Each structure stands twice: as C-alpha cells, then as structure tokens.
Amino acid sequence: MEVITDYGTFLREAKSAVQELDRMKEQQERLARQLKQDQKALEAGKKQVEDAIAQTTKKRKNDITAGYDKELSKGQERLKKARSKREKAKSQGVKERIVEETADLRDDNRRIRLQIRTLFQQEHVPAFCNTGWYYALYFPRWPGEFLQLAAAVLVCFLLIPYGIYAAIPAHGALYLALVYFVCAVGFGGLYVVIGNRTRDRCAQALKEGRQLRDEMRGNNKRMRVITRTIKRDRNEAIYNLEKYDDEIAQIEQSMKEMAAKKKDALNAFETVTRNIIADEITEGSREKLESMKRQCEEEEKQLKELENAVKDQNLHITDCYGSYIAREFLTPEKLDELADRMQNGTASSLSEAMEQLKKNAHNQNRPGL
C-alpha cells in the first residue's frame, strides 16, 4: 500500500473514477433497454411475417378447396336430379306394369259392378244396399266387415248416448238410463226396419250381390298380390332405364375425377405452392429483418464490451481506492465531503474524515434532534 502524499489529487482521481463507473453503468442500462426493445421489435417482425404466411396460405388453400367443392356440389345436384329422373321413370314403369298385369281383373270387377247394379235395378233393391256398410251390417262375412259392424255398434250404443248425456245439463242415473233407452230403441228400431224392408223382401238379390261382391273382393286381393310382387321385383331390365344409368355413371365418374384433381391440387399446394408463398413473403421483409438482426447483434456486442469495461472499472476502483476508502464513501458526494474536510484541516487523515462523516450521519439520524 503506497503512502498518499496529496489527498486532494487522490480524492479527485477517485471521484473521477467513480463518476466514470456511474456513466458506464448508466450507458449499460440504457443500452440493455434499447437491446430489449429492438429484440422485441425483431420478434414482432418475425411473428408478423409468420402470420402473413399462415393467413395467405390458409386463404389460398381455402380458395382451392372452395373452387373444387363448388364443382363437386354441382355434380351432387346433377346426380340427385339424374337419380330422381330414374326413380320417376321406374315408378312410372311399375305403375304401367301394374295396370297392364291387373287389367283383366279390373275389367272383371267393372263387369261385376255392372251386373250387381243391373240385378238390383231389376229386383227394385234400394241403391244404398249396394254399399260396403250395408253388407257389413246385415251380411257380414269377412274380418273387416265384422270390425265395421262392431264399430257401428260402439258408436250408436255407447259413444252417441254418452255424448248426449254429457251435453244435457241434468245428470243422474235416471237420465243416463233414459238416454241409453232412447238410443237403443231409436238405432235398434231403425236397424230392424231397414232389415225388414230390404233383407227380407230382397233376400235372393242381396245374396247374389253378396256372392258377386265376394268375387270382387277376391279380384282385389289378387290385384294387391300382383302389385306387391311387382313392387318387390328387383329386375329393372324391363323398365328401359339404361339411359338414366349411363347418365348417373357419367356424373359419378366426373365427380370421381374431380375429387382426384382436388386431392392433387391440394397436394401440390402443400408441397410446392406453400413454399413459394412463404419465400415471397419472407423475401419482402428479409432486408428489414436482417437490418434489425444486425442492429441487435451490434448492440449485444457493445453491451458485452460495456459489461467487461464496468467489471474492469470496478476492479480498478477496488485496487486503487478501495484500500483507503470504505465502499460506502465511494460516491461523488461523499468524496467531495472527504476532500473538504482534508483541505480545511478538520481531519488530518482519510480515516479521521470518514469517522467524522459517520458521526455526523449518526447524529442527524438520532431521534429528537
């Protein structure tokens, strides 16, 4: 440790070294903030380029997909119409086949209806007797007719009486019995009267009508069997649907080719076009981003140099002044105070001057002073 001969010069040099360190630290902090800001701007620029690439490629890909999907949608519509025309043609063919194969049975039914009408006219049978409801009520034979008879009984002898009873203001067992009695007499009497005036008087004609209606029923049953068999027949060759099948096949082949083209177009986009778009967008921002990158690299270099300079300056202060002056006094203000005490003779040494400053600071901080 060297002996200090000129305290004024020593303290001025210490102050200058400390000020230089503070200046270097301030410059270091300012440069670090600038570097952080520039790095953030660089990352934002890169992100902007990446977003532009992503948005552009997505839009281009969507345009390609939409274009092909539009054509495929048109194909689907054409296919739907072609299948609809084929189905209509088949339905028409089925109808014509049913008409053709049931023509004899329908002609036989027309003959039977005319025969019944002629018979009833000759025997003076009322026209209402030539109905399904009449035969269900007076000459039931088949399950459907018995169901009609049961329905008529249910309506006339249960639903109508109950409806009348519910509609009248006075309720009671007597009223209910009276309503049912009236309905039973009314409907029952009407049934008997009609039966006496028709079934008994025209029994032979009505029985022949029963037989003829049974023949029509058999014809209708055979027509339903023929109709059901024709509808279930899977052989469509007799309907001449070849032109519709050819049209459907052409549309399906066209759609298949369109789907293959779409797949190829998307594959080409992913493998080639996407890279071209990325290169074009990147090239447009390359110069700016490289300039920003060089700026950041230069600032990083300067910051590194400053960090080394600050470290060296710290070591210099420690080596040259730290042995004589405590770390707490290595500030410009404290060094000026030490210099003043040494110059005006208040203290004869640095140790004494530092001790006086400590006491003054302690006294100022005492409570009540």
Image (cartoon, rainbow, N blue to C red):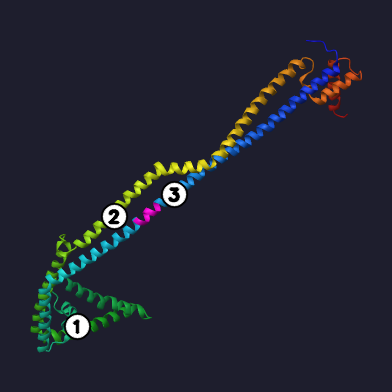
Q: Report the side of 260 relative to 38 (left or right).
A: left
Which is in the foreground here, disc 3 or disc 1?
3
Q: Quadrant of residue 351?
A: top right
Whichever of labels 3 and 1 marks the residue nearer the N terminus, that label is: 3
Please state which amino acid type lies under the numbered disc 2. Answer: Ser
Please state which amino acid type lies under the numbered disc 3. Answer: Arg
User: How packed is label 3: few (under 14 Cα within 10 Å), some, or many (20 or more)?
Assistant: some
Residue 362 seen anywhere in this rendered image of the structure: no
Q: Which residue is mark 2?
A: 254
Residue 176, percent across and down? 31, 78
Q: Which mark is residue 60?
A: 3
Whichever of labels 1 and 2 marks the residue nearer the N terminus, that label is: 1
- Relative to 1, say whether 174 is above or below: below
For image coordinates 37% across by 47% down, the residue present is 265
Figure label count: 3
Q: Which residue is mark 1?
A: 191
Residue 60, percent across and down? 44, 49
For image coordinates 17% across by 77% down, the residue present is 136
Residues drawn in magenta: 65-71
Which is in the foreground here, disc 1 or disc 2?
2
For image coordinates 35% across by 49% down, the residue present is 262
Q: Quadrant of residue 308?
A: top right
Q: Report the side of 32 relative to 14 (left or right).
A: left
Q: Quadrant of the C terminus?
A: top right
